[in-house]
Image (cartoon, helix red, strand yellow):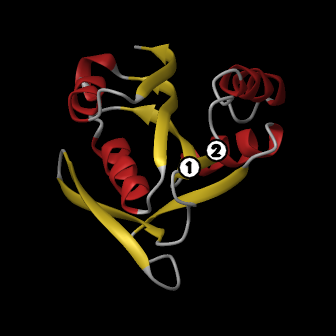
């Protein structure tokens, strides 16, 4: 899909329909950077990277999450968001929900308000939506494609 400019543009146009309530777009490393930064540019919003642990300079908040084969950790600068800033978190895939849940936790630690998470593809059989909606019932979960 990324190799096809027309398909990528179509995806970004669909994602942009869900960005109106956000003041800033946050993207999760790595492919969330691709969609999130392009979406931020196309909708005139700033972009905040949520990175894998150890890659950001200065002071950060971090959050661990489980994977099928162990644990991982993501982080964000402590001043990445303004207090009560409305955030849309973007990633390519919603699988188990662990990464997105950790990204929501980090945004909240910074004082931001996550209004929604937006993904290109949701792997429904892994039930990540349930993990997120049970923990954060007020956050909208948007997926362009469900498998």
Please give the name of the residue rendered at 73% of the width and 29% of the height, measured from the top-left corner: 12
Q: Nearer the viewer, residue 77 or 84?
A: 84
Please state, as top left, top right, bottom left or bottom right, where the C terminus lies in the image. Answer: top left
Element type where label 2 sits in the image: helix
Earlier-in-chain disc, 1 versus 2: 1
Q: Which residue is mark 2?
A: 36
Q: Position of residue 8 (x, y in %)?
A: 74, 29
Q: Position of residue 55 (x, y in %)?
A: 48, 76
Q: Which residue is mark 1?
A: 27
User: Disc 1 vs disc 2: Cβ atoms closer than 8 Å?
Assistant: yes
Q: Tell me if mark 1 has few (under 14), some (14-19) or many (20+) residues whose alpha carbon lies within 10 angstroms of its own.
A: many
Q: Is residue 100 left or right of residue 28?
A: left
Residue furthest to the front in view is: 84
Q: Position of residue 14 (x, y in %)?
A: 70, 19
Residue 107, quarter of the rendered image = bottom left
Q: Nearer the viewer, residue 26 or 145?
A: 26
Residue furthest to the bottom in view is: 58
Please give the name of the residue rendered at 51% of the width and 30% of the height, measured from the top-left corner: 119
Q: Tell me if mark 2 has few (under 14), some (14-19) or many (20+) residues whose alpha carbon lies within 10 angstroms of its own.
A: many
Please give the name of the residue rendered at 44% of the width and 58% of the height, measured from the top-left corner: 111
Q: Nearer the viewer, residue 90 or 113?
A: 113
Q: Is residue 48 left or right of residue 145?
A: right
Residue 100, quarter of the rendered image = top left
């Amino acid at each position: 899909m990324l190799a096809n400019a027309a398909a990528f543009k179509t995806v970004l146009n669909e994602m942009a329909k869900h960005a109106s309530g956000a003041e800033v777009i946050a993207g999760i490393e790595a492919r969330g950077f691709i969609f999130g930064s392009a979406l931020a540019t196309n909708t005139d919003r700033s972009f905040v990277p949520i990175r894998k642990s150890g890659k950001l300079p200065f002071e950060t908040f971090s959050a661990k999450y489980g994977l099928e084969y162990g644990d991982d950790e993501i982080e964000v600068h402590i001043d990445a968001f303004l207090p009560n800033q409305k955030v849309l978190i973007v990633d390519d895939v919603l699988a188990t929900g662990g990464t997105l849940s950790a990204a929501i936790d980090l945004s909240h630690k910074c004082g931001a308000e996550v209004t929604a998470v937006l993904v290109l593809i949701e792997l429904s059989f892994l039930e990540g939506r349930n993990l997120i909606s049970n923990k954060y019932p007020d956050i909208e979960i948007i997926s362009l494609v469900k498998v």
